[in-house]
Image (spheres, rainbow, N blue to C red):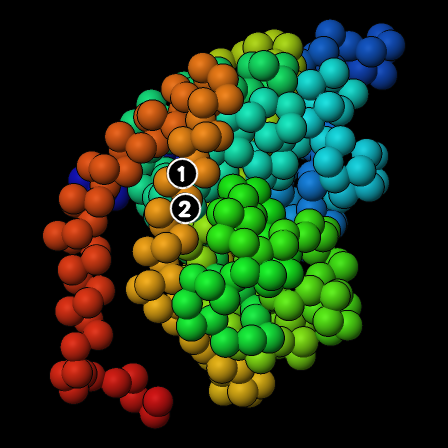
Amino acid sequence: MRLHILGKKMSTQRRNVIKTLGVGSLAAGAAASTFPKPAISQDLREWRMVTTWPANFPGLGTGANLLGELITKMSDGRLTVRVFGAGEIVPAFESMDAVGNGTVEMGHGAPYYWQGKVNAAAYLAAIPFGLTAQEQNAWFYYGGGQELADKVYAEMGAKFFPSGNTGTQMGGWFNKEMNSLADYQGLKMRIPGLGGKVVAAAGGTVVNLPGGEIPPALQAGQIDATEWVGPYNDLAFGLYRAAKYYYYPGWHEPATVLENFINLDAWNGLPDDLKAIVETANRAVNVTVLSEFVARNNDSLSTLVNEHGVELRPFNDEILAGLGQLAGEVMSDEASADPLSREVMDSLLSFREMAKSWAGVSEQSFMTARLLPFEFAQPSGG
Ligand code: CA
């Protein structure tokens, strides 16, 4: 009954609002036809977002598209964002320069691409044996990560937002069995970033190739192994055609952060409501992209194993513990590079210690329980 009355009230209010809006837009229309460039257009912003991804690339490029759409719709067009794939305005790895120098206002990519500019940026993407996606977000939103990331990105003239996450990646595709840490000696592997430094420390030869060149290089035997992302993206690349074994887990990229970076002057020039819209749209994209990766990885892993006969192999504990030990040494060296690297690394390492304790009694313990061999309800018809 009360709801009914409330509904009536609201519809009367809405009619009034519509009336007022009608008058308002008529007036604006009249002004526009009478005067050149009405003052109202100064409140309309059109931004360009360059990305490090090929246009519409599954999960990554489509995540950037979603960010542009959300900001445009949520602001009712007061801030319109047009998205450009790698190479459309600038090459992928020049995206940060284009944003920093104001050629464009925004960019979308992954923080480790900017390690050559500011070393600490690499740690914001992922550290080997570091944090899960949820822990990574907890660090950004509640562990001081956002503030530290802003400090790192300010050195490149940009504001930072986490804007998607691939979740736990796969260990990679190998053409030989990996039975001990010694099997890395002489192994030619495509693996970027900190993970690559760990593989090099284990005696491997690390090759860096952009995504598109990986499948032919593996097929031709120019490399013995490669990592890319996980089942969803690896299936799309057809990597199962070129390698025998699919190893897990992706110790080197337990959860890779995707980023939105914004020219600092452009960001500082936004009114508070548009700032809130950009921040909220990034939070929405952050969870949406991660959810897409989880859902598609579930399906794609099944396709790889059941339709393409891919052989899944776990890295054994000797290999993982050996790589973990080397990762610790590599990261200590890396963090000594400069005070900002040290600050970011210390914050991540403290958070990781706490996260290990909680995860041990929560998700880790639950997931082990879920795999116990009891009979459970199955979907009907499944
Ligand atoms: Ca990767």
Q: Which residue is denoted by mark 1 in the rendering?
A: 329
Q: Quadrant of the C terminus?
A: bottom left
Q: Quadrant of the N terminus?
A: top left
Mark 1 lies on a secondary structure that is helix
Q: Position of residue 120 (x, y in %)?
A: 51, 26
Q: Position of residue 116 (x, y in %)?
A: 65, 28
Mark 2–mark 1 Cα distance, whole angstroms, equals 5 Å
Mark 2 lies on a secondary structure that is helix
Residue at (34, 31) in percent of width and height: 348
Residue at (80, 38) in percent of width and height: 91
Left or right: 348, with 68 as reference point: left
Q: What label sits on residue 326 in the rendered view?
A: 2
Q: Is residue 289 visible?
A: no
Residue 40 vertical placement versus 177 (above, below): above
Q: In terms of image quadrants, where is residue 78?
A: top right
Q: Is residue 177 visible?
A: yes
Residue at (45, 30) in percent of width and height: 333
Q: Determine whether label 2 and label 1 are within 8 Å by CB.
A: yes
